[in-house]
Amino acid sequence: MQKRRGRTGRVRRRRRSCDSRGVNESHRPEFIELKKWLKDRKFEDTGLVPACFPGTGRGLMSRTSLQEGQMIISLPESCLLTTDTVIRSSLGPYIKKWKPPPSPLLALCTFLVSEKHAGDQSLWKSYLDILPTSYTCPVCLEPEVVDLLPEPLRTKAEEQRTHVQDFFTSSRTFFASLQPLFVESVDIIFSYSAFLWAWCTVNTRAVYLRSVRQDCLSVEPDTCALAPYLDLLNHSPHVQVKAAFNEKTGCYEIRTTSRCRKHEEVFICYGPHDNQRLLLEYGFVSDCNPHACVPVPGETLVKYLPAADKQVHRKMSILKDHGFTDTSWKKVLLGEVISDTNEKTSWGVAQKICSDYIEETRAVLRKCVIPHVECDPPVECVIPPVERVIPPVEHVILLWSM
Ligand SMILES: C[S@@+](CC[C@H](N)C(=O)[O-])C[C@H]1O[C@@H](n2cnc3c(N)ncnc32)[C@H](O)[C@@H]1O
């Protein structure tokens, strides 16, 4: 394709890059402190600056253009917060004593709450100061708001809330054992809201880093590490990166496999997640998400199938018996046409389901006030605007075919 040159192209290019330009925030005291803290731990600046972007909020901006394969960020091990950090802290002897051994996740959450409580005394203060004070994941939303979410997200959100509440309840005796470390009552320090904040911090910000198993922790996988500064990188489903700990350099490194222009936001990809997963795990949805899909439960689908088909329930049970309700969607997703008639019927049914779902979603959104909170404080908006929730019909992939 020919490259667009000339005035119109230039204006369009300029407008496009202005639209995505962020406002540099590196002058803010918390970022100056964080940079000093990182420097003391041998972090070498790679030309990224914190900035606030329209659409994605706080993130990192590149001061130079980045080429494919170039390093985005390289964070020395000494900057990483892992279970090893926790065990080397004053919590270590208490963790080692506790039976049954606490999970790696509990160790990280306990450390965050305890360091947050330590305030100015914490060695991690500079990092803690830039963390969001609250989160927008459904686990933090009021039950009435969660009720407005579509299925199966609503059920998953409720399950997640129950899971976090149970996790908290079952950890209270462990928190009680930490009392000798604090003047204030542990019931006040390790409150549910403090625990929820720590859980969301780990869940939304940790990178994958497999640690050597520690005997004093439970056998659950120890794969989460908090990576200060690097965790300011927002998600885009359109970029690809290579991220891993480099044993030779002793740094957690991220390299881009996509280009990025000077002064634009640098993204990483958190995974090929659809918008329901992004909302559930990270508290946001992504525009034009190529992984967007709307899961349609079997019972809903049956309601939309032609009434003349008396065999629907029988067909459904045959599909279920053969595991096709779970697996055949993969072939369909990859473009396999089952038959022309089925293809037409499926698209008709899909369109009807989509337009009904869109109408249902609009009705729910009409009930909501949409507060849009900008970057300061760093909390993303609670209810995403209509156009960010509803994917265009052509992006909605029906995961079923009969
Ligand atoms: C690892 S942090 C990234 C930095 C974060 N924006 C901050 O200010 O600290 C992940 C969180 O950033 C937000 N986020 C990441 N990517 C986003 C995007 N594309 N659009 C909107 N918010 C995004 C979500 O709140 C998510 O839970």
Image (cartoon, rainbow, N blue to C red):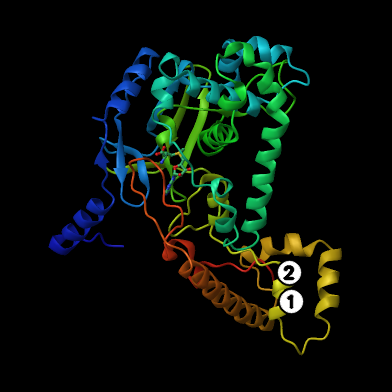
Q: Position of residue 51 (x, y in %)?
A: 30, 39
Q: Position of residue 341 (x, y in %)?
A: 68, 84
**Ligand number 1: quarter of image:** top left
115 vs 197: above or below: above
What residue sits 43% from the left and 23% below the top?
A: 75
Q: Position of residue 49 (x, y in %)?
A: 29, 33
Q: Nearer the viewer, residue 288 or 7?
A: 288
Count of numbered badges drawn on the protein: 2
Q: Which quadrant of the figure contains the N terminus? A: bottom left
129 vs 94: above or below: below
Residue 176 sits in which quadrant?
Answer: top right
Determine if residue 3 is in view: yes
Amino acid on which disc 2 is placed: Gly
362 relative to 333 in the view: left or right: left
Residue 146 sits in which quadrant?
Answer: bottom right
Disc 2 to disc 1: CB gap under 8 Å: yes
Q: Secondary structure at mark 2?
A: helix
Q: Residues within 10 Å of mark 1 (few under 14, many from 20)?
A: few
| Residue hosting label 1 | 302
Q: Which mark is residue 18?
A: none
What residue sits 42% from the left and 42% below the top?
A: 234
What residue sits 16% from the left and 64% below the top?
A: 8
Amino acid on which disc 1 is placed: Val
| Residue hosting label 2 | 298
Residue 312 sits in which quadrant?
Answer: bottom right
Name the residue furthest left. 7
Q: Residues within 10 Å of mark 2 (few under 14, many from 20)?
A: few
389 vs 240: above or below: below
